[in-house]
Amino acid sequence: MGGRFANVNNNGIVLPEADYLAAYGMTNDGPDTTPPTVVSVTRLDPSPTNAASVRFLVTFSEAVSGQDVSNFHVEASGMTGASITQMSNCPGATCTITVGVGSGSGTLRLDVWDDDTIKDAANIPLGGIGIGNGDFTSGELYDVQHYELYLPFILK
C-alpha cells in the first residue's frame, strides 16, 4: 500500500503516493536498468551525391554521453580517404556526424562501434556491459558519384 504525502505547495493538501509521484514527474519503477541503443543512422543530405562531404544523423534510444570519433566508423566501398571531419550535437539523444567523402565513386555508410564509453545518465553503456553488443551497422547508405571530366586534346 502506498503512503500519503503532504503537498506543501498546495496548502498542505494530502495526496496519495501515486498521485504525488505522478504530479511531480517521479516514478516508483526503481532505477534505470535499460541500456541505451542506437535507433538509426540516417542521411541528412540527398543521395546520390557528388558533394565533398555528407552528414549522418545518429539517433539513440535516450540521451547519452561519451561519444567521440573512435565510436564511429566510415564504411566506404569503391572510394578512398573517406573520414569523419566533424561531430556536432553530442552528447544527447542525437549526434550529427560529417564525413569527408574522399575520392572515387561508391557507397558510404556510418557505423557505430560500441566500446562501452557511450553511456546514459544511469551510467549504463550502449547495448549493456560488453564491448560490441551495442554496435550498429545497418544505417542508410550514400551513393557517391564523382565524375572526372576528360577533354580531348587536339594536336595539330
Image (cartoon, rainbow, N blue to C red):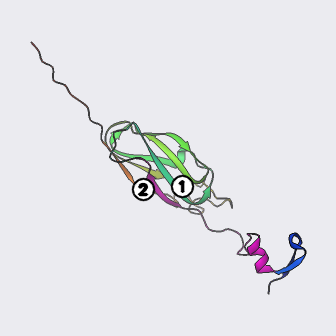
Label 2 sits on residue? 139
Query: Which residue occupies the foreground of this view, 111 or 4?
Result: 4
Which quadrant would the C terminus be assigned to in this image? top left
Amino acid carrying mark 2 in the image: Gly
Q: Which mark is residue 6?
A: none
**Relative to 50, 130 lies left or right:** right
Work out how far the residue at label 1 is from the one at label 2, CA to CA, in angstroms: 15 Å
Label 1 sits on residue? 114
Which quadrant would the N terminus be assigned to in this image? bottom right
Residue 17 place in picture, x, y as percent? 80, 80
- Assign a secondary structure to mark 1: loop
Amino acid carrying mark 1 in the image: Asp
Q: Earlier in the sequence, mark 1 or mark 2?
A: 1
Residue 153 place in picture, x, y as percent? 15, 20
Residue positioned 89% across, 71% down in the render: 8
Residue positioned 76% across, 73% down in the render: 23
Residue positioned most to the top: 156
Residue 37 place in picture, x, y as percent? 54, 62
